[in-house]
């Protein structure tokens, strides 16, 4: 980009709640489209299947609720799950770039397209 532009805009986004938005069904659909061994797919599916949560406070236990979205950010599978889920996030304009690592996302827009920065940012918000 710098070969053809005087400068570029780099916007950094930290989707701090990104891991909470990973829907297990969507993740499994996207994983099924990847060329991964069946045993890996089945392991991930088993990992997310029948997840539930309850809270205990002052000897009172809440009802058990099934979990259909969210991955633990500190887990080994967390960043990979988010990356697979966000893999189809692309810039509006093909000359722009979106670079992702875990829940950090960078939008790169060349100077000649400065007027389109807001369009790309709005697209990432959606």
Image: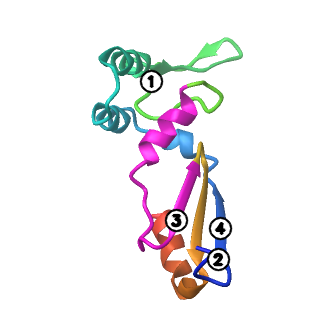
Label 4 crowd (10 A; few <14 / some 14-19 / many >=20): few
Q: Is residue 16 visible from the viewing direction of this image?
A: yes
Disc 2 designates what residue?
Answer: 8
- The residue indicated by pointer 1 is 65
Q: Nearer the viewer, residue 37 or 16?
A: 37
Q: Upstream in the sequence, badge 4 or badge 1? A: 4
Is residue 63 among what the camera can see?
no
Residue indicated by mark 4: 11
- Tell me how far mark 4 sits from mark 2, CA to CA: 10 Å
Q: Secondary structure at mark 2?
A: strand
Inter-mark Cα distance, 4 to 1:
38 Å
Is 10 positioned to the left or the right of 124 in the image? right
Discs 4, 3 touching: Cβ within 8 Å: no
According to the picture, the residue beneath numbered tag 3 turns out to be 97
Whether 19 is drawn above or below 55: the answer is: below
Name the residue: 41% across, 70% down: 94
Residue depth check, mark 4 versus mark 3: number of the one nearer the observer: 3
**Residue 91 among those drawn in magenta:** yes
């Amino acid at each position: 980009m710098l070969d053809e532009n005087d400068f570029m805009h780099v916007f950094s986004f930290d989707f701090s709640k990104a891991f909470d938005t990973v829907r297990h069904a969507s993740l499994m659909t996207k994983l099924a489209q990847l060329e991964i061994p069946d045993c890996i797919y089945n392991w991930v599916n088993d990992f997310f299947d029948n997840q539930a949560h309850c809270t205990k406070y002052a000897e009172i236990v809440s009802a058990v609720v099934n979990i259909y979205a969210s991955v633990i950010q500190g887990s080994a599978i967390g960043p990979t799950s988010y990356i697979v889920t966000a893999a189809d996030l692309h810039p509006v304009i093909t000359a722009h770039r979106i670079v992702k690592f875990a829940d950090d996302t960078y939008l790169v827009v060349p100077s000649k397209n400065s007027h389109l920065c807001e369009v790309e940012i709005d697209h990432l918000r959606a």
